[in-house]
Image (spheres, grey):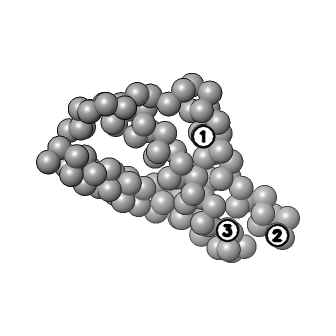
């Protein structure tokens, strides 16, 4: 039962928090017309950041108390967060370069 509750919590976090962040980012992207083709890259960046946030913080406050609960290594955290920021910012140069 705890596993099902935790899965529902993960879905809830990713849909609600990801949707809220997406709406904020989408309002920024909507200012530039050429970004419309590359918005999906920003969405990928949001979900990468949410993955890191879940693995490093949210998983320790949930219902699941089983094995395998550990933080991401610091190097992996920095790589994934860097990739996330890059994905969120990448549509801007793509639009400016006419990509």
Tell me if 53 is positioned left or right of 36 in this view.
left
Q: Are marks 2 and 1 in contact (CB under 8 Å)?
A: no
**Which element is circle 1 on?**
helix
**Which element is circle 2 on?**
loop
Q: What's the residue at 59%, 32% (across, down)? A: 76
- 3D distance between C-alphas at marks 2 and 1: 25 Å
Q: Residue furthest left?
A: 1
Q: Residues within 10 Å of mark 1 (few under 14, many from 20)?
A: some
Residue 17 visible in image:
yes
Badge number at residue 99: 2
In this view, 98 is above or below 92? below
- 3D distance between C-alphas at marks 2 and 3: 9 Å
Q: What's the residue at 46%, 62% (across, down)? A: 23
**Which element is circle 3 on?**
helix
Q: Residues within 10 Å of mark 3 (few under 14, many from 20)?
A: some
Badge number at residue 67: none
Residue 32 visible in image:
no
In this view, 31 is above or below 46? below
Q: Quadrant of residue 80?
A: top right
Q: Residues within 10 Å of mark 2 (few under 14, many from 20)?
A: few
In this view, 82 is above or below 45? above
Q: What's the residue at 40%, 28% (across, down)? A: 70
Q: Position of residue 68 (x, y in %)?
A: 37, 32
Q: Residue furthest right?
A: 97
Q: Are marks 2 and 3 in contact (CB under 8 Å)?
A: yes
Q: Residue furthest front?
A: 67
Badge number at residue 80: 1
Q: Nearer the viewer, residue 86 or 29?
A: 86
Q: Check the picture and name the quadrant holding the C terminus.
A: bottom right
Badge number at residue 38: 3
Of callouts 2 and 1, the N-terminal one: 1
Of callouts 1 and 3, the N-terminal one: 3
């Amino acid at each position: 039962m705890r596993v099902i509750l935790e899965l529902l919590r993960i879905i809830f976090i990713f849909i609600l928090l990801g949707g809220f962040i997406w709406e904020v980012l989408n309002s920024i992207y909507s200012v530039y017309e050429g970004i419309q083709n590359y918005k999906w890259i920003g969405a990928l960046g949001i979900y990468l950041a949410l993955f890191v946030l879940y693995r490093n913080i949210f998983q320790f406050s949930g219902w699941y108390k089983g094995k395998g609960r550990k933080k991401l290594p610091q190097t992996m955290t920095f790589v994934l967060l860097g990739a996330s920021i890059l994905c969120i910012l990448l549509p801007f140069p793509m639009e400016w370069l006419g990509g």
